[in-house]
Image (tube, rainbow, N blue to C red):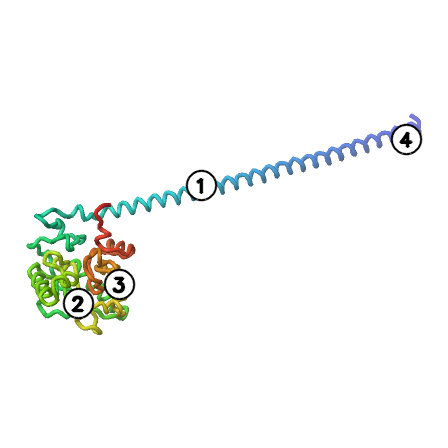
Amino acid sequence: MTMKNLVVATGLSFALLAGCQAGDGEQTSNQTENQSQNDGQTNNGSSNSSENNDGNQNKNNQNDSSKKEDQESDQSDEAKKDKSAAYPTMAETVEKNGENLTVTNPDSIYVVANKERNLPSDFVPKNLVEPDVSSYAPKDDPKRLMVKEAATALEKMFAGAKKDGFELKAVSGYRSYERQEAIFAYNAEQRGEEVANQVSAQAGQSEHQTGLTMDISTPSLGSSLTEEFGNTPEGKWVAEHAHEYGFVVRYLKGKEDITGYQYEPWHVRYVGKEAASDVHEAGVTLEEFFSEEK
């Protein structure tokens, strides 16, 4: 081979080699671009998938939250129904006795005695004890007494008032059928039967016979039982906190037509913490709370 031919051949080899290298470079570039595009499509697909998943998840969370609220609402309604069912109605706790209605649950903390619902004349509550509280009643006077459960609650209420800076004193608790009979007769003689009926219960119709009630006062009023008690700091404390100890103010202002008695802020009645809280929250009388129907 001549030198010229060798040079030509050599040049052709270099050209072929350069072309092959250039082709490889373009292919690599195309592969890189294609890979980049594929990666972009993959990333876009992942992003869209992620957004869709997040959206679906949010919708699921909202649906779950809505279902939970509905379930909680249903449970709340059921709880109210169950709570209502736990208390007896007045229709369930009375029987006809001649011309009168006599309660059938005189020992219950849920008993309702009023002008239409009489306690048995021979009823005497069990477990009468003297609460360890300051009292205006003479020593050994039966009106110092209360049913044990109510007496214990009264002690806690008086202690709670003292802790908050208020002093309460007991005035009159348990009264027998015979004692109430004498009290009403005296009031009727002094003030007339019509007035007596507004301020005093006839025998068998007084909550005091249940042993679940205490009339209370404060040193600023002495042993007087007057509406003024409701305006004293002590009376306001009782109205606000008595339910925390299981008591309710039995005869509310504005409810005279329902209870049959004048407003008595001093007259507290034990019904237990649960019922007392429910009655207090509802702002009703026992007649309304233990209604004829559930």
Q: Amino acid at mark 2?
A: Ala
Give residue 63's mark.
1
Which numbered disc, 2 or 1, marks the residue that appears first in the sequence?
A: 1
Residue 47 shown left or right of residue 241 in the figure: right
Which numbered disc, 1 or 3, marks the residue that appears first in the sequence?
A: 1
Give residue 239's mark.
3
Note whether 255 is above or below 171 in the view shown.
above
Please name which of the two marks, 4 or 2, marks the residue nearer to the observer: 2
- The answer for how far apart the CA atoms under marks 2 and 3 are is 16 Å
Q: Amino acid at mark 1?
A: Asn
Tell me which residue sits at (9%, 69%) in the image.
139
Tell me which residue sits at (8%, 56%) in the image.
124
The N terminus, quarter of image: top right
Tell me which residue sits at (48%, 41%) in the image.
59
Give residue 170's mark.
2
Instruction: Identify the element where label 4 is drawn.
Output: helix
- The answer for how far apart the CA atoms under marks 1 and 3 are is 44 Å
Please name which of the two marks, 2 or 3, marks the residue nearer to the observer: 3
- The answer for how far apart the CA atoms under marks 2 and 1 are is 57 Å
- Along the viewing direction, whichever of 259 and 5 lies nearer the viewer: 259
